[in-house]
C-alpha cells in the first residue's frame, strides 16, 4: 500500500469511529418526546401501559394469562384503586367471598380496559411477570409465594393456625373453555390455595418416579377453592388484605373454616408476663402468600410490621369472540 493510500485509509477509519461515538452519545442523551412515557425508578424498570394489554400468545388464544407484580401500598393505594369494583358480585359468591376475606384474600373483577388505570394508581415496584396457561383441563402452578418456605404455624385462616407439613404456599389452577348463552366463550377456572409439600428424609428416594399432579403435591384448602366462569374482556385481580379490614361495606369475615390442619389461636400472654423480644403476629394465608415482608421493620406483640408492597395477581381470560360446541 502506498503512503498516500495508507493516509486515506487512516482518515476514513478515524471518521467512522467518530461517527459511531457521536451516535452512541446521542442515543444516551435523547429524551422521550412524550413526558408521559415515564419509567418506574426501581432496580427492574418497565413502562406503565396506557392501554389494555393484548394477548401474549399469537393465533387463537384459548386459556388464561397470569400477570403479577409488586405494587406500592404505602398509602393504601391498592384498596383505593380497587374499591369502586367491589360491588360486582362476579366471580365469587358471597359465602366464598367471606371465607376468602377471613383468609386474607380479596378478588375483584374489573373491565380489562381499566387495568392500566389500576396500575398507575398502585405504582409497580417490580417488573411485571406474565405466563400463559392453555385451557387444557390439567392442574398447573399459577403463582408461588416469593419468600421463605412455610412452616407449621406460619400463617392462619380465620384466627386458626396452620398445623401441617412444611412447604411453600402457592396457587394452582386448571382451566377449560365453555360456551355461554350469547354464543361466546368463557374460561372455566378452578383456583386452589395449596401448601406445596417439601421433600423430606422419609421420602423413598429409591422409589420409581410416578406421575403426580400438582393437586397431589401438598395440602389444598378445599373450602377456599374458587370455581367460576371467567369472561373475556375482564381482568380478575387478586391481592391480600388484613382480615377484618373493610374496603367499604362488606360482609363479616367469619366463616366455617375447614378445621383440618388448623388450630385456634392460643390465649395471648399479658405484656407483663413476657420476656425477651416481642413475638411477631402470625399473618393470614393471603398475607403470607401475596404480601411483601418489610425489609427492615420489626413487629411487636400482636402488631406485625405492615408491608409497604403487595402482590397483584391478575387473571386475564382469552377466548374466541364466537364459540359454540358445534364449531
Image (cartoon, rainbow, N blue to C red):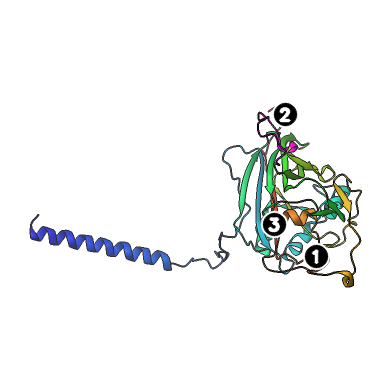
Q: Are marks 1 and 2 in contact (CB under 8 Å)?
A: no
What residue lies at 11% left-to-right and 58% top-to-bottom?
5
Q: Are marks 3 and 2 in contact (CB under 8 Å)?
A: no
What residue lies at 37% left-to-right and 63% top-to-bottom?
24
Residue 303 in magenta?
no
Residue 244 percent across, percent down from the top left: 86, 61
Q: Foreground residue, 180 or 283? A: 283
Q: Which mark is residue 311?
A: 3
Within 10 Å of disc 3 (Cα), the crowding (few <14, some 14-19, many 20+) is: many
What residue lies at 91% left-to-right and 61% top-to-bottom?
267
Q: Which mark is residue 325?
A: 2
Which of discs 1 and 3 lies nearer the camera? The answer is: 1
Q: Secondary structure at mark 2?
A: loop
Q: Which mark is residue 155?
A: none
210 left or right of 100?
A: left
Residues in magenta, as a range: 201-216
Q: Secondary structure at mark 1?
A: loop
Residue corresponding to mark 1: 279
Separation (CA) of disc 1 from disc 2: 57 Å
Quick one: label 1 or label 2, which is nearer the N terminus? Answer: 1
Within 10 Å of disc 2 (Cα), the crowding (few <14, some 14-19, many 20+) is: few
Residue 290 percent across, percent down from the top left: 72, 55
Residue 301 appearing in the image: yes
247 left or right of 125?
A: right
Position of 103 relative to 207 (above/below) = below
Quick one: label 1 or label 3, which is nearer the N terminus? Answer: 1
> Magenta-highlighted stretch: main secondary structure?
loop
Quadrant of residue 48 within the rendered picture: bottom right
Amino acid at each position: 500500500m502506498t503512503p498516500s493510500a495508507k493516509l486515506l485509509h487512516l482518515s476514513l477509519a478515524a471518521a467512522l469511529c467518530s461517527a459511531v461515538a457521536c451516535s452512541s452519545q446521542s442515543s444516551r442523551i435523547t429524551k422521550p418526546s412524550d413526558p408521559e412515557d415515564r419509567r418506574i425508578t426501581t432496580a427492574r424498570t418497565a413502562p406503565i401501559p396506557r392501554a389494555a394489554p393484548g394477548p401474549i400468545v399469537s393465533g387463537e388464544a384459548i386459556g388464561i394469562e397470569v400477570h403479577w407484580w409488586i405494587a406500592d401500598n404505602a398509602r393504601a393505594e391498592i384498596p383505593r384503586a380497587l374499591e369502586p369494583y367491589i360491588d360486582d358480585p362476579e366471580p365469587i359468591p358471597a359465602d366464598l367471598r367471606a371465607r376468602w376475606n377471613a383468609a386474607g384474600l380479596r378478588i375483584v373483577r374489573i373491565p380489562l380496559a381499566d387495568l392500566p388505570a389500576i396500575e398507575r394508581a398502585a405504582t409497580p415496584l417490580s417488573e411485571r411477570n406474565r405466563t400463559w396457561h392453555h385451557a387444557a383441563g390439567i392442574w398447573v402452578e399459577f403463582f408461588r409465594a416469593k419468600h421463605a418456605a412455610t412452616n407449621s404455624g406460619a400463617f392462619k385462616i380465620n384466627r386458626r393456625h396452620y398445623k401441617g407439613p412444611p412447604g411453600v404456599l402457592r396457587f394452582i389452577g386448571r382451566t377449560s373453555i365453555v360456551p355461554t348463552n350469547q354464543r361466546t366463550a368463557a374460561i372455566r377456572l378452578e383456583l386452589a390455595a395449596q401448601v406445596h409439600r417439601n421433600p423430606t428424609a422419609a421420602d423413598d428416594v429409591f422409589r420409581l418416579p410416578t406421575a403426580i399432579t400438582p393437586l397431589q403435591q401438598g395440602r389444598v384448602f378445599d373450602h377456599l377453592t374458587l370455581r367460576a366462569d371467567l369472561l373475556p374482556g375482564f381482568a380478575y385481580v387478586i391481592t391480600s388484605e388484613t382480615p377484618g379490614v373493610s374496603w367499604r361495606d362488606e360482609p363479616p369475615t367469619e366463616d366455617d373454616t375447614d378445621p383440618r390442619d388448623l388450630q385456634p389461636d392460643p390465649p395471648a400472654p399479658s405484656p407483663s408476663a413476657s420476656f425477651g423480644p416481642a413475638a411477631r403476629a402470625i399473618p393470614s394465608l393471603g398475607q403470607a402468600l401475596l404480601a411483601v415482608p418489610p425489609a427492615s421493620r420489626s413487629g411487636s406483640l400482636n402488631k406485625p410490621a405492615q408491608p409497604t408492597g403487595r402482590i397483584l395477581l391478575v387473571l386475564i381470560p382469552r377466548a374466541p369472540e364466537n364459540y359454540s360446541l358445534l364449531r
